[in-house]
Image (spheres, helix red, strand yellow):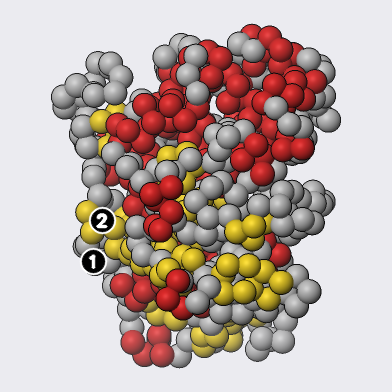
């Protein structure tokens, strides 16, 4: 049973009521009715022509961007913030807060075709046993411990769901299955227990109504396990509730195998890993791979479902183990570079080099939210979307990703053409030593910060920072405003929606009291201004600069300030204010371009940035 790392279950199997946010504290017809925005890849769009695909037939041939190692500068990133991602991985090798979060990790990050960071830290194999009486790990002798390297292979745990989803979308493309068809059309036995109406889309988006999982590993034979799945009853009406479910992906596996007559591992090898050259990615790695594989848990009762001792080179998840290592929800092993190839393929629109594994339209649907009825549980076909709880500041409505309970994650941000892969063995020596997703959030924040925000005008802008549980204020010098005075500036914001906000305010009594300053914003090429009558912005603005206009009250000593507030959990990419100017008729009362004016600004938590 995969001890799924989901919000509300930081310790493993318990399914608590916590929201996704609090964790750690339409038909695919390729030209049909569903309209989606294009996946943002600067290289893929330009490359959408070329020679014939080597995987599937199609009218267009493409040669997508391939990966190369390079510097942060070559990737269009800020080097000092890329370096901070490595520091995050190293920091969590220590007490977090009592035990190490992980024994080892590999962090790989890049933008476009450049991998700017590919760093391993810690020990891939450190502990031979665990003593629950003293809550201590029993280490191998030093000469038997194995350092992690960038090529270390990790148990992906639930990242395996992405491979199952990719195979499903490939079969939808080819007309072998239909997105809105009931799964029972392909596997009649699945209709048992009242599951006859559950669709392929609901399995892919975790809205099937099935519970999270059942203990297949206690049932014995494969036929007994499948019979339990056929007999399983939904706990919710399909399509009415979002519930992350291993059963959904195990069910989808049965559809894929029945339709094709091939096991899932062969489908993945033939359709994904083989064509893309992902040579270190597979189910059931051979014994010869063991020295290059990171060990996972010392699995013993009662904290594990099975008494297996040190799990090393075999799948950690109990249910995947019961299914002989090949399951729809878990079982894939991989290394960071291979996962980066997969990330680049998807950001390219389904192509890598001369190989296409999916059409561009299919990839766009994988990154389009099918769960609009369940705010906060945004989900494409297989990919989770817009989840600050592990993506950190990389999260946008189009950012896709997934986590794995063993300590793995992947985040793809089409808006900046960037990707972050984290491989970790955070259940080594035991799952109870870690919970939450703090390292992932911190790495996502630092890497998002590495993508520069260029000022719309001039070479500098004010930046409100990315600190949680903070208030940053930027106050202009006292101004003598008359009727008709106006504030104008450039504004950029990307905050956690509804929790972190930027407020414009004025004070006519020396700062004793403050009033909201209503304003309007206009996006580049926008049809018209958007009114912000409460004087605030929050959420995602498209990561583009907007122009702001506000009418100021008249007063002999008016104070104008920006106040940026964040709560204690997650922060977005932040807020920027640039080209500030206050006009009173033809007179310029304040301007950022005048050094004397700028020096009189009172900034608390804000800095001048030259990104």
Q: Position of residue 258 (x, y in %)?
A: 56, 14
Q: Is residue 526 left or right of residue 225?
A: left
| Residue drawn at x 46%, y 46% as measured from the top left | 333
* Count of marks overlaid on the render: 2
Q: Quadrant of residue 388?
A: bottom right
Q: Position of residue 429 (x, y in %)?
A: 61, 66
Q: Quadrant of residue 364?
A: top left
Q: Is residue 347 left or right of residue 502?
A: left
Query: In this orientation, which residue lies closer to the viewer: 407 or 226?
Result: 226
Is residue 500 visible in this depiction of the protein? no
Query: In this orientation, which residue lies closer to the viewer: 361 or 274?
Result: 274
Residue sticking out furthest to the left = 51
Element carrying mark 1: loop
Query: In this orientation, which residue lies closer to the viewer: 494 or 12?
Result: 12
List the residue tagged with mark 2. 114
Q: Quadrant of residue 582?
A: bottom left
* Disc 1 crowd, CA 10 A, few/some/many (<14, 14-19, 20+): some
Query: In this orientation, which residue lies closer to the viewer: 390 or 223?
Result: 223
| Residue drawn at x 52%, y 59% as measured from the top left | 295
Q: CA distance from mark 1 to mark 2?
A: 8 Å
Q: Position of residue 428 (x, y in %)?
A: 59, 64
Which numbered dot is residue 219? Answer: none
Element carrying mark 2: strand
Which numbered dot is residue 71? Answer: 1
Q: Quadrant of the N terminus?
A: top right
Quick check: marks 1 and 2 in contact, CB under 8 Å? yes
């Amino acid at each position: 049973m995969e001890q799924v790392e989901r919000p509300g279950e930081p310790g493993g199997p318990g399914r608590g009521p916590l929201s996704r946010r609090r964790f750690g504290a339409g038909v695919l017809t390729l030209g049909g009715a569903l309209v989606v925005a294009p996946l943002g890849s600067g290289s893929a769009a330009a490359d959408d022509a070329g020679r014939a695909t080597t995987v599937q037939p199609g009218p267009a041939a493409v040669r997508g961007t391939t990966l190369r190692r390079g510097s942060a500068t070559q990737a269009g990133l800020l080097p000092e913030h890329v370096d901070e991602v490595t520091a995050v991985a190293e920091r969590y090798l220590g007490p977090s807060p009592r035990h190490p979060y992980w024994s080892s990790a590999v962090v790989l990050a890049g933008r476009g075709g450049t991998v700017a960071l590919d760093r391993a830290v810690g020990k891939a194999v450190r502990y031979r046993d665990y003593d629950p009486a003293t809550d201590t790990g029993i280490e191998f002798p030093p000469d038997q411990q194995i350092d992690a390297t960038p090529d270390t292979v990790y148990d992906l745990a639930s990242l395996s769901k992405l491979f199952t989803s990719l195979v499903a979308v490939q079969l939808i493309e080819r007309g072998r299955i239909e997105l809105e068809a009931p799964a029972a059309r392909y596997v009649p036995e699945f209709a048992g227990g009242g599951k006859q109406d559950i669709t392929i889309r609901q399995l892919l988006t975790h809205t099937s109504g099935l519970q999270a999982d059942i203990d297949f590993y206690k049932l014995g034979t494969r036929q007994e396990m499948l019979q339990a799945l056929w007999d399983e009853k939904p706990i919710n009406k399909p399509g009415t509730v979002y519930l992350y479910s291993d059963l959904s992906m195990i069910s989808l596996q049965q559809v894929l195998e029945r339709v094709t007559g091939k096991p899932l591992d062969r489908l993945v090898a033939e359709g994904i890993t083989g064509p893309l050259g992902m040579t270190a990615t597979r189910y059931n790695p051979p014994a010869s791979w063991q020295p290059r594989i990171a060990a996972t848990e010392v699995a013993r009762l009662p904290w594990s479902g099975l008494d297996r001792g040190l799990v090393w080179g075999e799948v950690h998840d109990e249910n995947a183990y019961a299914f002989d290592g090949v399951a729809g929800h878990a079982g894939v092993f991989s290394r960071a570079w291979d996962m980066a190839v997969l990330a680049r393929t998807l950001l390219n629109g389904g192509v890598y080099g001369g190989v296409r594994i999916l059409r561009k339209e299919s990839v766009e649907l994988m990154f389009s939210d099918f769960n609009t009825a369940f705010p906060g549980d945004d989900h494409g076909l297989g990919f989770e979307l817009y989840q600050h709880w592990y993506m950190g500041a990389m999260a946008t409505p189009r950012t896709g990703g997934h986590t794995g309970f063993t300590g793995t994650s992947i985040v793809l941000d089409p808006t900046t053409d960037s990707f972050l892969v984290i491989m970790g063995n955070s259940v080594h020596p035991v799952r109870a030593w870690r919970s939450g997703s703090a390292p992932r959030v911190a790495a996502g924040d630092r890497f998002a910060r590495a993508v520069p925000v260029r000022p719309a005008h001039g070479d500098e802008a004010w930046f409100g920072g990315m600190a949680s549980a903070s208030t940053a204020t930027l106050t202009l010098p006292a101004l003598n405003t008359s009727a008709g005075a106006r504030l104008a500036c450039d504004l950029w914001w990307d905050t956690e929606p509804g929790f972190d906000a930027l407020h414009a305010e004025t004070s006519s009594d020396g700062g004793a009291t403050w009033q909201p300053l209503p304003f309007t914003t206009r996006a580049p090429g926008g049809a018209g201004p958007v009114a912000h009558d409460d004087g605030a912005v929050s959420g995602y603005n498209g990561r583009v600069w907007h122009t702001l206009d506000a009418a100021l009250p008249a007063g002999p000593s008016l104070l104008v300030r920006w106040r940026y507030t964040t709560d204690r959990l997650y922060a977005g990419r932040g807020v920027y204010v640039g080209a500030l100017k206050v006009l009173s008729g033809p007179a310029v009362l304040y301007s950022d371009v005048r050094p004397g004016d700028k020096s009189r600004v009172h900034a608390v938590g804000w800095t001048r940035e030259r990104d």
